[in-house]
Image (spheres, rainbow, N blue to C red):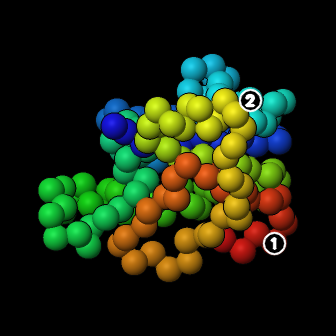
Amino acid sequence: MCLCVYIASDKPLITQEYCKSKPGFYVDCGEAQGQAGLFAKLYPGQHYYEAGSHMGCACGLENYSTLPDDPRSESERNQSNQDVVDFHAWLKAQSKHATLRVFCTDWPNEMYAALEAQAIEEQPFVPLVDFEEEYWMPEDVVLLIEKSEETKM
């Protein structure tokens, strides 16, 4: 199942459209319905977004190129690397004027129950400092990025 990355913000954010002719990192306005609607229940009155990668979903926002059984081509690994870097640059830029909450999940059935019960843990976001060709999005927790003029991402 694909990863989903949802973002709630206290202010409107800049979006980046998905481009079929040159796929890469994108952020679309999310709708507070369906799966995203459950996330919206935790943070009502926010602006909602969904982030993705060159793959058309959020799976490319993780990079596991150091695994010996990575089936991807070199160009696809390179694009995932770029998508991760672009995603973190976007988060850094947006957090200069807004508080963000990022939620990544592959939506197993138990997550629906946890979201409905508002039983999701919130923790500080650990920014990407030195990209070393491997990056995993923490799943099933809400990553908090506080608004800061001096964001240290």
Residue type highlighted by circle 2 = Lys
- Residue 48 in picture, x, y percent from top left: 69, 33
Q: Residues within 10 Å of mark 1 (few under 14, many from 20)?
A: few
Horizontal side of 106 relative to 124 (left or right) equals left
The tag on residue 93 is: none
Residue type highlighted by circle 1 = Glu
Element type at marker 2? helix
The residue at the point 70 percent across, 34 percent down is: 117
Q: Mark 2, mark 1: which one is toward the viewer?
A: 2
Element type at marker 1? loop
Front in this rendered view, residue 45 or 132: 45
User: Which residue position is annotated with label 2?
Assistant: 41
The tag on residue 150 is: 1
The residue at the point 52 percent across, 59 percent down is: 138
- Reading the chain from its start, which is encountered first: label 2 or label 1? 2
The residue at the point 35 percent across, 57 percent down is: 80
36 above or below 83? above
Determine contact: label 2, label 1, CB under 8 Å. no
Horizontal side of 120 relative to 18 (left or right) equals right
- Residue 106 in picture, x, y percent from top left: 43, 41
Residue 100 shows up from this direction: yes
- Residue 82 in picture, x, y percent from top left: 40, 60
How far separated are the C-alphas under marks 2 and 1? 30 Å
The residue at the point 49 percent across, 44 percent down is: 105
